[in-house]
Image (cartoon, rainbow, N blue to C red):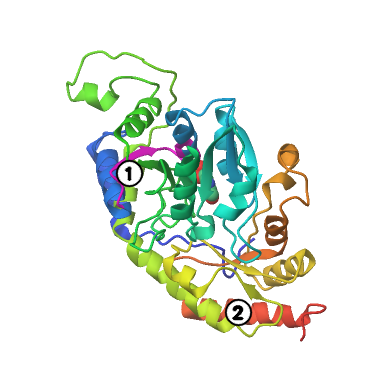
Amino acid sequence: MAWQIPLTELTIGEDDVAAVVQCLEEGWLTMGPRVDQFERGVAAFCGAPHAAAVNSGTAALHLACRALELVPEDEVIVPALTFVASVNAPRYVGATPVLCDTASPTDLNLSVESVEPHITERTRAIVAVHFCGYPADVVGLRRLCDSRGILLIEDAAQGIGCLVSEDGRRAGTVGDAGCLSFFSKKQLFVGEGGMVLSSDEETDKRVRLLRSHGMSASTWDRHRGYGYSYDVVDVGYNFRLDEPRAALGLSRLAKLEAGIEARRRAVRQYRELLADVPGVELAWSDEQVERSSHFAFPILLDDAEACDAMRTGLADRGIQTTRYPVIHGFSGYRELAPMGSLPNAESAAGRHCALPLSASTSEAEVEQVVEAVRSVATGLPGSVR
Ligand SMILES: Cc1ncc(COP(=O)(O)O)c(C=O)c1O
């Protein structure tokens, strides 16, 4: 379907193309100097001491679990409202994911209060997701984790650059590991890619080892003459990022701050124009909007039926939307929690609908989407007040 206004649009500049072409012309494609430079650039942007690039956000989460040595006896608390990769990561190492609720019906992140009832003697880690780019309370969760001897993994796949503390720390720098995604719809995109942020040198070393088969020297190291051979010291993976993607990432990184600000401007306009639309509730607060890095802009309808009608009505008008189902609603994940046990997440999953948002979303597009939302909303049963 050709959408009049798609959910996200990529704006790739000539300079981005030139950066990739130059990389191809230079002729070194597997992980090398550009990956190294990209890692240093992202580490500086996020304020993280270490950053190790991998080939997806999912690989970043998987390696965080391996590097932090989670084992099958462990339980890992994960929000029920997230993308499935957050829940799969502990499963890859045999650990048991334990789903928790969102903070409230309108704050769609987990919270200290929503996590606490799920802590048991087996809880080894919490995966805090910065859902839609809005900062989860990782400062509060850090305190909780420290007092209970629990690890904190930040899933910042949707939240690169969001501000998680009063003193301006960015997502991924408070946990024992912070995982980023550079998937093509993310604020910083390369197609497929990810990164593990950490402040502990040993964690970073483990991630670097495991991303490349557990080998003691990389192809790039050997190309530069740093050793003729290598040892394999652990069972690793091929989760390496390649040079063309790193070249694109470096070029895009220079535009990330401006892109986040452009998304924030669009969200402010959305919120202002939607304030008087009947049956539409806004998620999170204005203060949280200022700290978010705005991966997505969800609105809340009265219930799942109203949400379906809104999505269909907008699709009929050429406007693409999306919705995240709750994890224990998926057929392969039903055993993780009984339906009805996580009421805020279940309600939010049923009644949220994310509207189009990109760094290039224009004022006119926001106006057009809001007018469409208004026209559908006023036609919804029970929504004319
Ligand atoms: C919250 C969350 N975690 C993890 C991931 C996985 O990232 P990737 O698609 O780069 O593997 C995503 C991707 O959409 C995500 O939204």
Disc tally is: 2
Q: Is residue 51 magenta?
A: yes
Q: Is residue 374 magenta?
A: no
Residue 106 visible in the shown view: yes
Q: Are marks 1 and 2 in contact (CB under 8 Å)?
A: no
Can you give x and y, in whole percent of width and height, for residue 17 in the image?
Answer: 32, 53
| Identity of the residue furthest to the front in this view | 147
**Looking at the rendering, in which quadrant would you find the C terminus?**
bottom right
Q: For the view shown, which residue lies furthest in the right direction? A: 381
Precedes in sequence: disc 1 or disc 2:
1
Counting other residues with Cα less than 10 Å from the Cα at mark 2, is it few (<14), some (14-19), or many (20 or more)?
some
Asked if the beta carbon under badge 2 is closer than 8 A to the nearest atom of ligand 1, the reply is no
| Mark 1: secondary structure | helix
31 to the left or right of 127: left
Three-letter residue code for mark 2: Val
Residue 256, quarter of the rendered image:
bottom left
Q: Residue at x 50, y 74 (%)?
A: 286
Report the residue marked by disc 2: 370
225 or 120, which lies in front?
Answer: 120
The residue that label 1 is drawn on is: 246
The magenta region covers 47-60
Looking at the figure, which quarter contains the N terminus? bottom right
Q: Is residue 135 left or right of residue 29?
A: right
